[in-house]
Amino acid sequence: MVSLRDIDLMGTIVLTTIPLLAIYTVFCVPLTWKTAVWSIVYYFTTGFGITAGYHRYWSHRSYDAAKPYQLFMALAGAGAAEGSIKWWSRHHRAHHRWTDTDRDPYSAHKGFWHSHILWMMIKENPKKRGLVDINDLNKDPIVMWQHKNFIPVMLFMAFVFPTLVAGIGWGDWMGGYFWAGITRLLFVHHATFCVNSLAHWLGETSFDDRFTPRDHFITALITMGEGYHNFHHEFPSDFRNAIFFWQYDPTKWLIWFCSLFGLTYNLHVFPENEVQKGRLQMQEKKIAQLKAKLKWGPPLETLPEYSFDEFRSLVKDQGKQLLIIEGTIYDVENFIDHHPGGRMFLKAGLGRDMTNSFNGGVYDHHNAARNLLSGLRFGRLQGQVPETYKAKDE
């Protein structure tokens, strides 16, 4: 049970106040088209600060970046008000190292809403903290500058800056604060929070089904391209989240576009051969699951054995409607009237070896016919078939 002492007061205040102020904004603050455009632009700017900056650059080092780019992402990420780079990246590295365990700060096994938001409203238990290496972050001057000055930087980038742009730009001070500041922040929060919740709940396990991360285009649309999460957990050092051109991943394209100007470089891509191995292995699993649902007839090794004389006796003396194909005895009693080639062909083959006729002597049967035979298995032939009982080419 969670007690009052377990509540993270600051996180709870921020995460409950922002939605209430956003509701007030919708009903009480007029929205001009200029402020609407600016709110959307700043939504993507601060969102990319998290996805391209906090996540793919600092948390995973999936590419290298020039100092101006790093500074821009540090400021944009602060505008998303999701903690400092150091705080955010430490938790995210723990999430990857300890996925789905008690040491995962936002483990999906603790429930959708815990992963989405509640983990930030509850104090972290130091005894269950997943240990990770953040020495590179501690040595990064931009990371440490932002971390030490996070509160004033965050307040300026999240609320003051968007207000100044709208106020100085077209005189909409209130709209800039409430729409581009408050309401924009609400959408950024829950879009990026969906990476921890929705991306572990909706979609396919395209590369590994042992853990909860999943791939889905809806999550990608919501999270600015972070929705192909099963791929990401398998190959976290890849700067991409989506590997196909038709998959939505604007963060990937932003990183690539910046590389054209030298702002980003050494974009890491996991070897295609290894990526395809993972995809193929999961496809094989799915095929095996589908095969398990189908009736393939009794396995050959479980069938009783009959000599040719015993086989002939079953047909001649007991009236069994049996024939032989490739050493296997088949009972065609329930199929003889449905044979596409007519009843007479099967009736003429009763008590005989019809291997040659089945494989092209009369007709080279399709895969469907060969699959159908598996359900008609009766036994295995022991020994040879006399030549006089083998069907010839016709």
Image: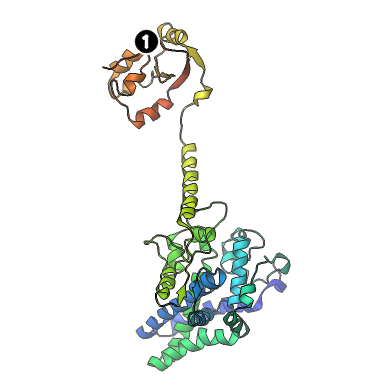
The picture places residue 295, in percent across and down from the top left corner, at 46, 32
Q: Is residue 95 left or right of residue 271?
A: right
Q: Choose between 255 and 371: the one closer to the eye.
A: 255
Q: Residues within 10 Å of mark 1 (few under 14, many from 20)?
A: few
User: How is colour applied across the structure in the image?
Assistant: rainbow
Answer above or below: position of 358 versus 140: above
Per the image, the residue denoted by label 1 is 387
The amino acid sitting under disc 1 is Glu
The picture places residue 175, in percent across and down from the top left corner, at 43, 87
Q: Is residue 232 left or right of residue 349?
A: right
Element marked by disc 1 = helix
Q: Choose between 108 and 21: the one closer to the eye.
A: 108
Q: Is residue 174 left or right of residue 349?
A: right
- Which residue is at 57% across, 82% downward? 142
Q: How many marks?
A: 1
- Which residue is at 46% across, 35% downward? 294
The picture places residue 193, in percent across and down from the top left corner, at 53, 69
The N terminus is located in which quarter? bottom right
Q: Choose between 286 and 10: the one closer to the eye.
A: 286
- Which residue is at 51% across, 68% downward? 62
Question: Can residue 373 be seen by looking at this rendering?
Answer: yes
Question: Can residue 190 be seen by looking at this rendering?
Answer: no
The picture places residue 182, in percent across and down from the top left corner, at 49, 82
